[in-house]
Image: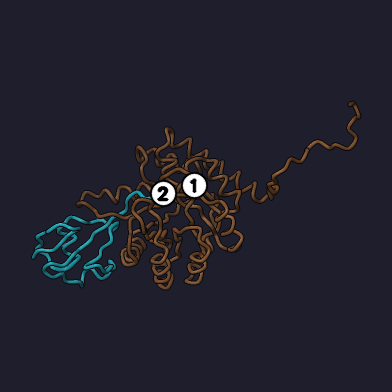
Chain colours: A cyan, B brown
Amino acid sequence: MRIILNGDQCEVTATTLAQILLEQGHKTDAIATAVNGVFVHKHRRAELFLKEGDRLEIVAPMQGG
Amino acid sequence: MVEFYGTRIDNPLLLGTARYPSPSVLAASVKQSGVNVVTVSLRREAGANGVGQKFWDLIKALNVRVLPNTASCYTVKEAVITAQMAREVFATNWIKLEVIGHSDTLQPDVFSLVEAARILNEEGFEVFPYTTEDLVVADKLVQVGCQVLMPWGSPIGSGRGLSNPYGLRSLRAHFKDLTIVIDAGIGLPSHAAHAMELGCDAVLLNTAVAKAGNPVTMAMAFADAVAAGRMAYLAQPIEQTDMAHPSTPVIGKAFLA
């Protein structure tokens, strides 16, 4: 299915958020996620199924002032 | 010594982590200045290259507390979600809450700021709101649970120092028990000392150190300035006057005319 990953169209085969993160190569704990503008706690990733057209945001630490 | 939500911090200088020439200069600036708190942020992870993890490993190795921010958020929703994500990644309830209202000045949208602060306080966050020196806004932030205020000195990254010392002095006088941190606009150590002399509890800055010709030395200069300003405030500075007052006693002066 196609989802919007960090603003870009992305084709994924996995269906749960946890599986999609693995499919995209995110193996670190240093990320946080939101789906369709709602924060998804890491403990909920395995049970959250994404749908066609869902908007997934993945963020990680970076420098800030 | 400064206290944030019951946590005591030795060094009242807080440093941002952006815009340094290299990670090693950032690390050296933090270490050499003795800073205990640094600000960090969150951004989209461009790929699975682990850039975010590498930065986070660098910060963790510095053995300092982190204050995540909601930089570049323009709405309550954006700021709240960013704070929720930051709490998970950085494992802290502290959040430097920025809700920007004007893209040129990066002035806070104080109406949205109060609403976002209300939501985050209810969710158990310890909110550090980036605000103006406006007393009414400060009162609203306190009403929704904020115990720290972070008024701007002047626009972020401008290096202009304190635009409204009178307003900051008023803020200090009206909120005696709150922790006040000057955030943004500091360009020189003398600006930071000025803020502390007015009774502010801490100073947060980034660009003035990161973009200096020698960031490490500048960070040390700021640490000294903040300490000197705090000491001066506690020593109770004299009142300013418009007229001169001779410091040498005139009584007993020889009559030589």
- What residue is disc 2 on? B156
Give coordinates of residue B180: x percent, y percent: 53, 57
Quarter assignment of residue B18: top left
Give coordinates of residue A8: x percent, y percent: 15, 57
Separation of residues labelled 2 and 1 (CA atoms): 20 Å
Left or right: residue A20 versus residue B187 is left
Q: Quadrant of the C terminus of chain B?
A: top right
Image: B29 above or below A21: above
Quarter assignment of residue A48: bottom left
Q: Secondary structure at mark 2?
A: loop
Which residue shows up at 59% across the image and 63% down it? B174
What amino acid is at disc 2? Ile
- Of the pair B245 and B248, the residue shown nearer to us: B245
- Of the pair B23 and B154, the residue shown nearer to us: B154
What amino acid is at disc 1? Val
Chain of the residue under label 1: B
- What residue is disc 1 on? B35
Which residue shows up at 59% across the image and 58% down it? B170
Image: B256 above or below A38: above
Image: B70 above or below B243: below
Which residue shows up at 47% across the image and 53% down it? B152
Left or right: residue B123 versus residue B34 is left
Left or right: residue B68 versus residue B226 is left
Give coordinates of residue B220: x percent, y percent: 51, 39
Earlier in the chain: of badge 2 and badge 1, it is 1
Task: Please name which of the two marks, 2 or 1, marks the residue nearer to the observer.
Answer: 2
Chain of the residue under label 2: B
